[in-house]
Amino acid sequence: MKFPKGIKRILISQPEPQGERSPYHDVSKRYNFKVDFIPFLNVESITLREFRKFKINIPEYSAVIFNSKNAIDYFFKICEEIRHKMPQDAKYFCSSEQIAFYLQKYIQYRKRKVVYANGTVQDLQTILSKHKANEKFIMPCSSTGTGQLSVFLKQNKFNYAEAIMYKMVPNENLKKKNFDYDLISFFNPEGVKAFYSVFPTFKQGKTIIGAFGEPTQKALMDKGLQVVVKAPVGEIKSMVMAIDKLFKDYPNLKH
């Protein structure tokens, strides 16, 4: 594909980080581009009454599988609402290092009970397989499910349950935005679906596409898009690191 002459504007399809200084601002100053934070999805909690309809008893499960920060937030929200405190010996399996570290918001972090994959579905599957015999897993998710991982768990007859704890709805405010971006980043397949529900005729042209995680990359490629900026890959653990690498590989993109 042909790249733009320079990168002036980048869209990060997540909420703008609050509190701590965002590394995106540092990299935007370094390479002289403007960064906008516009989520493609709005996250809505399900009610406790809706959750109870699924007849899932959280205390019955010895391990939790997390593949997003939203899953962590809404899992512990439900736990609080049902007045359940996770036991000290509970185990947590996370799809990436970033998600594992986010757990510190809710638990005392210890490596012996928090295990994380390298960001790929295959690595998480390998890790889970090693613990299959000894754990009963619960996997918090949105109403859209967890795709490939769910299929793997069912096919391999894991003792597990998917627990819908939140729903993802397209951000209708996207229609009001001027999407004149040189680079657009996506972070989950649901975001890809939401984006195309608002912009069904989107063509890539010279727009550089970034994607976090293999399922997101696949969802974009299924739409015929070429994904240039990828994470996590090797030492590139985050989208901001992947963007930094793009500028290092193609210095002429600096505006």
Image (cartoon, rainbow, N blue to C red):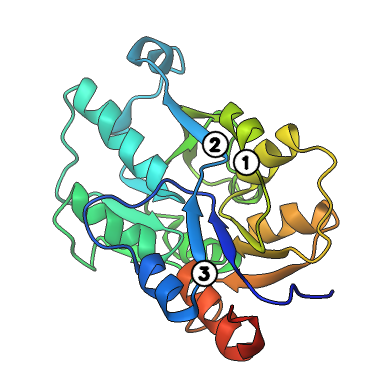
Judged from the image, the secondary structure of the residue bearing numbered disc 3 is loop
Residue 53 lies, with reference to residue 195, above or below; the image says: above
Judged from the image, the secondary structure of the residue bearing numbered disc 1 is helix
For disc 1, the neighbor class at 10 Å (few under 14, some 14 to 19, many from 20) is many
Q: Are marks 2 and 1 in contact (CB under 8 Å)?
A: yes
Q: Are marks 3 and 1 in contact (CB under 8 Å)?
A: no
- Alpha carbon of mark 3 to alpha carbon of mark 1: how far? 27 Å
Camera-near label (2 vs 3) is: 3
Task: Write the residue at 53% across / 46% down.
Answer: 158
Residue 51 lies, with reference to residue 101, above or below; the image says: above
Residue 145 appearing in the image: yes
Residue type at mark 1?
A: Glu
Give residue 202's position: percent from left, percent from top: 81, 46
Task: Write the residue at 56% across / 77% down.
Answer: 233
Judged from the image, the secondary structure of the residue bearing numbered disc 2 is strand
Task: Write the residue at 38% across / 48% down.
Answer: 69
Query: Residue 175 lies in what quarter of the image?
Result: top right
Q: Nearer the viewer, residue 119 or 40?
A: 40
Which of the numbered marks, if any, corresponds to residue 41? 2
Q: Which residue is mark 1?
A: 190
Q: Which residue is mark 3?
A: 33
Image quadrant where one finds the N terminus: bottom right
Residue 154 appearing in the image: no
Give residue 182's position: percent from left, percent from top: 67, 64
